[in-house]
Image (tube, grey):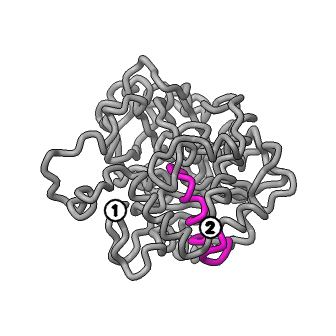
């Protein structure tokens, strides 16, 4: 049985910044070594690696540079923002099955330079599935999500003022987090409403930060985790998800474009878990764009379709940056909107910190945390638990 058979025992990160001098390989090495040091594990013991298909640093390069032993598992997950829980889950499966003993998952990226972003490198002739949307002006992910949000606002009578509460709440959490890029930078509703529009109805503050940095986690068996210095954070349940008839990002042509990949991941996740949505105390929800919070609240069963904005305002909106009185604390480090955007890996670290009990916005008495991947792409989700 996979449930609670593996644990995250070390986490590491670099500085988050708009312009870091080290290469992506150097940043990856820094984060991985920090995670291994925290776990009390020598690099020579690592025999499993997991990364994104969008990762420029290869497994061989990282293993050779850091002095890993022979590798018995190495795998990648595609679709960028949908990958973080998927990569962790796949490495955990390798460890739980006995294929490997010590796994490392990492993500290193330097995206503060606009020229490095995928949508800035589109060929003059587009011959993949984006040929159906890019000639109409949907050039960037924000344009594609904006189309979905326009439909959502029309169907459910949701206003921009309601959507603003997502960004404002996460900024308040970021103020408590010294690692966050937006720490100390206040945002009011007036700031939000007066911000420049990026792709209607999404303004500047509905978009994630573009960040340089690297993150890594270390995964071992539950048995070994008990003997290591850090409080084990058990991987309780995990699933990937891709909905029927899916088309990446521009998913407008299905019978219900507001039924997302998260619905597919959620149903299989809850099937495996001892928890249900009502038992979850904190959620780190992938937030490249603020609408993903509302879409995911509905997909993961916290509320009914169309009720995401009201549920967030009633149960998740922090006034002070603290978690007191919240039914569900969301993106307590500031998330991709206000901490950093490392393709969803920073919210994995925040989930680990919440379960350990050392978050800067700690939920009292917490023993589980949901972590999700990108809603408009094939994705994954997992539940972390303090109890084995």
Q: Residue drawn 50% across and 30% down?
A: 31
Q: Which region is colored magenta?
A: 287-308
Helix, strand or loop under label 2: loop
Q: x, y (%) of residue 221?
A: 56, 52
Q: Is residue 292 magenta?
A: yes
The residue identified by callout 1 is 248
Q: How many residues crowd around disc 1 within 10 Å: few (fewer than 14), some, or many (20 or more)? A: some
Q: In the rendered view, tell whether residue 366 sits above or below residue 119.
A: below
Q: Nearer the viewer, residue 319 or 68?
A: 319
Residue 131 as seen in the image, left or right of residue 257: left
Residue 145 position, x and y percent, is: 44, 58
Q: Quadrant of the C terminus?
A: bottom right
Mark 1 lies on a secondary structure that is loop
Q: Is residue 359 above or below residue 380?
A: above
Q: Between residues 39 and 263, which one lies in front from this camera angle?
A: 263
Tag 2 residue: 158
Left/right placement of residue 354 relative to residue 131 reads right
The residue mark sitting in front, 2 or 1, is 2
Q: Is residue 4 visible?
A: no
Residue 78 lies in quadrant? bottom left
Magenta stretch holds residue 32:
no
What residue is at 45 percent from the left and 21 percent from the top? 20
- Give coordinates of residue 6: x percent, y percent: 57, 55
Provide residue 150's location: percent of width, then percent of height: 49, 65
Neighbour class for label 2 at 10 Å: few (<14), some, many (≥20)? some
Can residue 308 be seen at all in this image of the molecule? yes
350 sits left or right of 56 in the view: right
Identify the residue shown where x is 37% and y is 60%: 249
Residue at 47%, 47% (x, y): give it.
101
In the picture, the quarter occupied by the N terminus is bottom right
């Amino acid at each position: 049985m996979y449930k609670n058979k593996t644990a995250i025992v070390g986490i590491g990160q670099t500085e988050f910044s708009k312009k870091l001098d080290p290469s992506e390989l150097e940043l990856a090495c820094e984060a991985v070594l920090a995670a291994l040091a925290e776990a009390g594990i020598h690099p020579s013991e690592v025999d499993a690696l997991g990364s994104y298909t969008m990762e420029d640093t290869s497994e061989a390069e990282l293993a050779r540079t850091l002095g890993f032993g022979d590798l018995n598992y190495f795998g990648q997950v595609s679709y960028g923002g949908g990958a973080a829980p998927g990569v962790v889950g796949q490495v955990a499966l390798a460890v739980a099955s006995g294929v490997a003993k010590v796994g490392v998952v990492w993500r290193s990226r330097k995206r503060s330079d606009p020229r490095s972003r995928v949508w800035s490198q589109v060929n003059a002739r587009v011959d993949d599935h984006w040929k159906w949307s890019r000639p109409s002006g949907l050039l960037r992910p924000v344009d594609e999500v904006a189309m979905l949000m326009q439909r959502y606002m029309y169907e459910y009578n949701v206003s921009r003022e309601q959507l603003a509460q997502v960004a404002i709440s996460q900024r308040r959490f970021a103020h408590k987090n010294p690692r966050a890029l937006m720490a100390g930078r206040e945002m009011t509703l007036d700031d939000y409403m007066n911000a420049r529009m990026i792709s209607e109805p999404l303004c500047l503050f509905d978009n994630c930060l573009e960040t340089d940095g690297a993150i890594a986690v270390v995964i071992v068996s539950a048995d070994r985790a008990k003997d290591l210095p850090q409080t084990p954070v058990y991987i309780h349940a995990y699933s990937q998800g891709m909905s029927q008839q899916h088309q990446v990002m521009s998913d407008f042509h299905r019978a219900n474009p507001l039924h997302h990949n998260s619905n597919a991941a959620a149903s299989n996740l809850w099937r495996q878990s001892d928890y249900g949505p009502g038992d979850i105390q904190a959620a780190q929800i992938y937030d490249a764009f603020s609408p993903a919070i509302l879409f995911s609240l509905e997909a993961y069963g916290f509320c009914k379709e169309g009720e995401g904005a009201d549920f967030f305002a009633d149960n998740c909106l922090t006034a002070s940056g603290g978690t007191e009185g919240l039914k569900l604390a969301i993106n307590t480090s500031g998330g991709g909107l206000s901490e950093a955007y490392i393709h969803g890996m920073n919210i994995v670290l925040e989930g680990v910190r919440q379960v350990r009990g050392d978050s800067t916005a700690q939920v009292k008495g917490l023993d589980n945390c949901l972590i999700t991947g990108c809603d408009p792409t094939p994705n994954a989700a997992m539940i972390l638990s303090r109890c084995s």
